[in-house]
Image (spheres, rainbow, N blue to C red):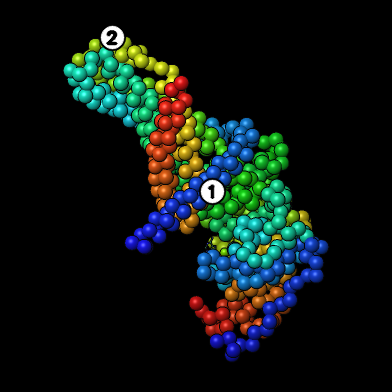
Amino acid sequence: MEAFLTKIGAGILRGLTNAGHGTMLLRAIFLQTPHIWKMRREVLVQMHVVLVGSMPLVIVTSVFVGAVTAVQAVYQMQALVPMKFLGVMISKTVFIELGPVLMALVVGSRLCAFYAAELGTMKVTEQLDAMSIMAIDPVRYLAMPRFWAAVTMIPVVTIFADAVAILGGYTISVMTLDISAGVFIEGLQLFYKHSDILGGLIKAVVFGAIIALSGIFNGFNTQGGAEGVGHATMTAVVASCLSVLVADYFLAIILFQIIFQK
Amino acid sequence: MNLEYNIPPPPEQKVADPAKFRGIVMEGVSKSFGPKQVLKETDLLIHKGETLVVFGRSGEGKSVLLKHIVRLLEPDAGKIWVEGEEISEMEVSDLMEMRKQFGFLFQGAALFDSMNICKNVGLMLEEHSGWPMEKISARACEALALVGLMDSDDKLPSELSGGMKKRAGLARAIVMEPEYILYDEPTTGLDPITGDAINDLIIKLQKELGVTSIVVTHDMASAFKVADRMAMLSRGKIVFTGTVDEVRSTDHPMVRQFIEGNSQGPLGAF
Ligand SMILES: Nc1ncnc2c1ncn2[C@@H]1O[C@H](COP(=O)(O)OP(=O)(O)O)[C@@H](O)[C@H]1O
Ligand SMILES: [Mg+2]
């Protein structure tokens, strides 16, 4: 029992230390951000990594998310709620919750693993040391472009995913669930608020930052050889997913109970 | 166990005022990784303009020693001065300026594997020289030609053999014409002919550009060829320093055992 408690204590302590070091990394990234124009090529390359490489994943995920939301909604609404509310149900869940969160989990894990494995390999093969020796700051050259690429492109991916998911929901509703196109589209506009999309985007920005930080931080702090890189990648993805889910809860409170409530 | 060998005390390597010494001073540097103490109050002097060879068995901490000089590793105790400046107290910006005076050849070359060889070699110029691209690539090609790699400039590191990587790493280390070059096993993994060409290059850089070099190696043929002075690292300490002739003729039992490649002696076999 005591050993168990010690373990938990050590875990919490490690988590807090890492959070502290992560904050320091974030600070260093912000301090290097004025050099972003000089690093624009690398930023574009990294944006390309987020956007183009993820598209098949985004499309497949979103189509099915939209479709399953429609099917489930119709099942739950049966005879209780008029079908004109179908559109609004789908759009709100997708914009506010499913779009940002699923993209952060799916595209985010992909990206986070990529960052951690790439930077971790650079760490264990002394490429990061080589960079420091050459008086090139790895935070400026590697971390900062990756961070901003994730922070800007994860929201773009999310918007795209939102659109594809709504389209998926629409297609399934009209083709297999006997909902007319007019009813669905009318439903979409029913209680539409800009704040839904805006809130989802703010979430996506924060998630992008979490994903990038987790990948970069764990990559930079990789120890050992191939096993170390594997371990760093695993830790990065787990930490990113958990942090996204926890942050999602707090963002929901801040955004939809405080800010957009007024 | 060492009682049967007559091992002289380590050489005296202190300077009165490290802040006035031209070159590099390591004083009482200790470094441990976990329970394992690698450097034990190591003292070492590197005079400006000389080529110092540090030799010793693998795993003795030669690479660790080299990394301390450019503050890639920080000592647990002890101090290091470069041209009179104590490096652990330097601001990051001063440290960066200091590092621009250093070329570092890593034991595993440490080439950036997402960039081709030319970009690897030219990166430091791109970042620090402010030169136009044509001039940078011309200079990078020049450096590659010095190590015999002019035909491989558009290859990725993964497409090179181990020896070619080493040479590309060397080209990268010398491209800025640094004042100090730290070589971590420059000839290991090279064929004897290429290895000797690298020896010649090390000598040429010293003679023509006045470079101060620290060469870590256990290739004694190379060591005897390039060294002005040699130092042996064993069990975390510099146990012997001397000129090439002094090393050849010493009866220090550890040095003798090492250069004769004898499994019997004060160093033990394993
Ligand atoms: N980053 C590190 N973490 C833990 N141990 C290390 C690290 N770097 C070196 N060591 C240990 O220090 C000792 C000396 O290593 P090194 O300097 O690479 O030896 P060599 O003389 O062959 O260059 C080795 O036992 C190695 O295991
Ligand atoms: Mg070594």
Taking depth in this image into account, of B161 and B14 the one nearest to the observer is B14
Kindly identify which chain the residue marked by label 2 belongs to.
A
In the rendered view, would you say B215 is above or below A158? below
Residue A18 horizontal/vertical position (percent)? 49, 49
Residue B11 visible in the current orientation: yes
Identified at 31% across, 14% down, the residue is: A187
> Which residue is under mark 1?
A21
In the rendered view, would you say B90 is above or below B140? below
Residue B113 visible in the current orientation: no
Instruction: Answer left or right for B98 relative to A80.
Output: right
- Which amino acid, by three-letter code, is at mark 1? His
Label 2, secondary structure: give it. helix
Around disc 2, counting alpha carbons within 10 Å, would you say few (fewer than 14), some (14 to 19), or many (20 or more)? few
Identified at 58% across, 41% down, the residue is: A27
Q: Quadrant of ligand 1?
A: bottom right
> Which residue is under mark 2?
A182
Kindly identify which chain the residue marked by label 1 belongs to.
A
Label 1, secondary structure: give it. helix
- Which amino acid, by three-letter code, is at mark 2? Gly
